[in-house]
Amino acid sequence: MSACVAKLWHDDMTFGQKYRSIDTKNVTARLHKWFNVDAGTDIRDAELEMVAAILPNLFGYHIVQLGKQVSENFLTTTRISHTVLVGNTTETDEHCNVVGRCDALPLQSNTIDVLVAPHVLEFAGEPHAVLREAERVLIGEGYIVLVGFNPWSLCGLWRVLAGWRGRPPWNGQFLSASRITDWLKLLGFEIEFLKKTSFRPPLGRRSITMKLRFLELLGSACWRFFGNVYVVVGKKRVAAVTPLKASWQTRRRLVAGGVAEPTTRTRNDVSSHPDRAP
């Protein structure tokens, strides 16, 4: 890691240490209610639709979803047979459920093909630790699919206005897509996909949000940068080691007295000095 990259990572780590501790179990329950009962249903549907279009193109043997605060249905469209749901509670569902923390995953290193993390970083005490764990458990060429709130959106505005109440999701740490992609690149990921979606205000009254459906088409055409949520797909790079072929060869020549002198000389050296023919 170069000195410049190391400094940037250190600065981000210092920034990350300022994140407050969050009661994740309480947040999970309240977030699930917001996404499935209250104003977040439209945002949830937009996220599920986008992830559903991505997962069929990602292959492997094992796929993991971190948390079910949004929905248990993010993995329904995957072609990977073995699906695992990691949560911080003992609640069970139809998937193979694993109880554990997102910043200390109970999974072996280099074993997971795809990792889906919907709204995990916003409510993690240390977002960097979550990403480092993701990099650890993913195989080479494995994928991470991150879903997060865009601070430069109507949801970001709502957070400014209602964050003081301390209620999810407005008490979360909204991280911009550019910051997330920078962190992923520092960990050795290539950014394969980045898109924002959902352009309606997060209103609780269903009748009003239905009348504002035209904002989805207008927003996707005119102000894509201001989508309420983003989906980022990163691919874990593997450094390829290519063996170098020797460019020299051992040559022997006769010198005075009939003694063979071993020498090493590149072909280019011989060709560039025709008067030194062997």
Image (cartoon, helix red, strand yellow):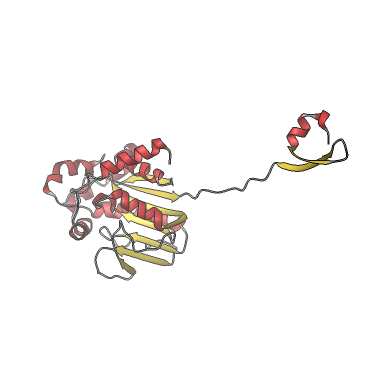
Instruction: Count the labels in the image.
Output: 0
Q: In which quadrant of the rendered image does the C terminus lie?
A: top right
**Toward the viewer: 263 or 222?**
263
Q: In x, y percent, where is residue 217? A: 32, 43
Dividing the picture into quadrants, the one containing residue 89 is bottom left
In the picture provided, is 80 more to the left or to the right than 222?
A: right
Which residue is nearer to you in this view: 202 or 78? Answer: 78
**Residue at (17% x, 59% y) in the render:** 26
Q: Does residue 13 appear in the picture of this structure?
A: yes
Is 169 or 249 nearer to us in this picture?
249
Image quarter hosting the N terminus: top left
For the point 85% across and 41% down, which residue is it? 259
Q: Residue furthest left?
A: 165
The percent coordinates of residue 8 (x first, y second) are 35, 38
Answer whether residue 48 is visible to the viewer in this image. no
Residue at (76%, 29%) from the top-left corner?
Answer: 272
Figure check: 30 above or below 15: below
| Position of 223 relative to 114 (above/below) | above
Percent of width and height locating residue 234: 41, 49
Horizontal side of residue 268 vs 212, given as left or right? right
Q: In percent of the image, x 37 and y 48: which residue is there? A: 232
Q: Residue furthest front?
A: 257
Foreground pick, 21 / 31: 21
Q: Is residue 211 above or below residue 84?
A: above
Query: Which image quadrant is residue 51 in?
Result: bottom left
> In the image, 39: left or right of 52?
left
